[in-house]
Image (tube, helix red, strand yellow):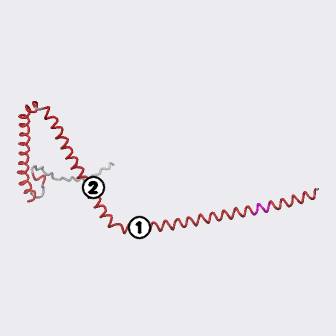
Amino acid sequence: MADVRTHSHQLQVHPQRQHEGGIKVLYPQSGPSSTQVLAVFVGVPIGGTLLTIAGLTLAGSVIGLMLAFPLFLIFSPVIVPAAFVIGLAMTGFLASGAIGLTGLSSMSWVLNYIRRAGQHIPEELEEAKHRLADMAEYVGQRTKDAGQTIEDKAHDVREAKTFDVRDRDTTKGTHNVRDTKTT
């Protein structure tokens, strides 16, 4: 007798969405907001204008350098030291500005830190008082314990010396007695 089992299988089919390109991928639920549209309408012309000005400035610099290059060759004994001096002066101005800005930002940080710390000082002062009181109590207890230990040891030493002295006295007395008896 063959045991034949029948199994029921279920097959689930999930529909696949087709990929839609374009702006719906970035904004699947709705279109761009009015703020985003305004940013694009204002940003593109301003960015384009600035890029155009940057390109014109670069082109003007290259043309000016090409026209001035013969003059640089002719007047190089004068221009090179002048350029060196101007470069040092600009470096000095930039360094002083950077150092000044660093100083101002440091002072601002310190003032803000002091303001924030001033708000927490009473809490920290109370915490310090509690820690100091706890430490004083701990030191006092340790001092009492150390004093008691020293007192106990001194008492033990005193008792040991007392017994030692009594033992010596009794042994001396017996020696003397023995010595007197034997002689």
The residue positioned 6% from the left and 40% from the top of the image is 60
Q: CA distance from mark 2 to mark 1?
A: 29 Å
Q: Is residue 142 left or right of 22 when viewed as pictured?
A: right
Residue that protrudes farthest toward the right in the picture: 183
* Residue matched to label 2: 106
Q: Amino acid at mark 2?
A: Ser
Q: Residues within 10 Å of mark 1 (few under 14, many from 20)?
A: few
The residue positioned 88% from the left and 59% from the top of the image is 176
Q: What is the number of the mark on residue 127? A: 1
Q: Position of residue 79 (x, y in %)?
A: 13, 35
> Is 78 placed above or below 36 here?
above
Q: Is residue 166 left or right of 81 when viewed as pictured?
A: right
- The residue mark sitting in front, 2 or 1, is 2
**Front-lying residue, 1 or 151:** 151
Q: Main secondary structure of the magenta part?
A: helix
Per the image, label 1 sits on a secondary structure element best described as: helix
